[in-house]
Amino acid sequence: MTSADYPRIRLRCLIVDDEPNAVNLLEMFIQQNTSWDLLAKCYDAREALAFLKSHTVDLVFLDINMPHLTGMEMAALLPPSTRIVFTTAYSEFAAESYGFPTIDYLLKPITLKRFYAALQKIEEYFARPDHQSGAHSPSSPAEVSAKTGNPEDEFFFVKSGRALQKILLKDILYFEGEKEYVRVVTPVHKLLVYRRLKDIEEQLSASFARVHNSYIVNIARLESIRDNQVFVGGKQIPISEKFREAFMNRIKERVF
């Protein structure tokens, strides 16, 4: 069977993999056997998320084992309309991968025969009458805010795989930002949100304070402050010079 046996569908796709040889192989398969538009090749999940902030794709070929941010973590941050083909050398992640909008799971090294099988699945999926092409969103609804009359009951939802995890604002220990995403940390959760720390800061109540370019802490949950550090949830967080004065002025209001 040749690539001519498959329907010609125009898809926008992205490769995310930290292995150059794997990227080059997938690029060759796509260019020689499909009519898809390969918009970019990213060698880091953070680079890919930055790209997706200004570009919309239909399909992501996503490696699982990557530094800084794994493929599974990145998958939880993708727009709901984006479909995924996971590429990995590890079969043990297969079951977990289908908690996301996954079309296929390719084990490395990927053969042309196996790529053809994935190609058929992908094009059959996007050719279905119930698939609404063009209904794409450039950014993921990673969280849905909800306020109530009582600030103690304020909450929001964080998208985690196919689930929306409810988080009470009062339970949050701190937010940790890194480029295009933020880690929300509570005593029981560490969830990633595809947002900038600055955007989240603007929506928070007075209980939260910026202590560093990368950290916002919940003052009500602080355990101690020592030298230029705050301690919360067993973590030591630096207070930078930029935020120290404003932060300490707020703390002085509660010093006996």
Image (cartoon, rainbow, N blue to C red):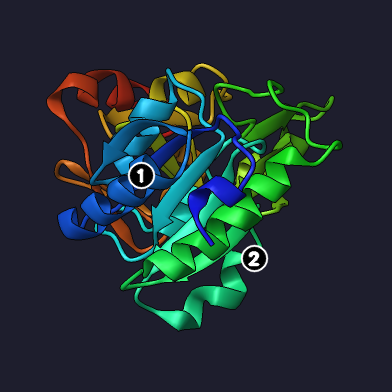
**In the rendered structure, which amino acid carries the disc numbered 1?**
Gln
Relative horizontal placement of residue 181, taking residue 179 as reference (left or right): right
Q: Residue at x 30, y 18 (%)?
A: 246
Type of the residue with mark 2: Tyr
How much space separates mark 2 and mark 1, taking CA atoms? Answer: 28 Å
Res. 167 visible in picture: no
| Earlier residue among tags 2 and 1 | 1
Depth check, front residue: 131 or 117: 117
What number is the disc on residue 73? none
Q: Residues within 10 Å of mark 1 (few under 14, many from 20)?
A: few
Residue 75 visible to an observer of this rendering: yes
Front: mark 2 or 1: 1
User: Which residue is denoted by mark 1 in the rendering?
Assistant: 32
- What secondary structure is found at the residue carrying circle 1? helix
Residue, x 71% and y 31% (percent of image)?
144
The secondary element bearing badge 2 is classed as loop
Is 226 on the left-hand or right-hand side of 63?
left
| Residue at which label 2 appears | 98
Q: Quadrant of residue 234?
A: bottom left
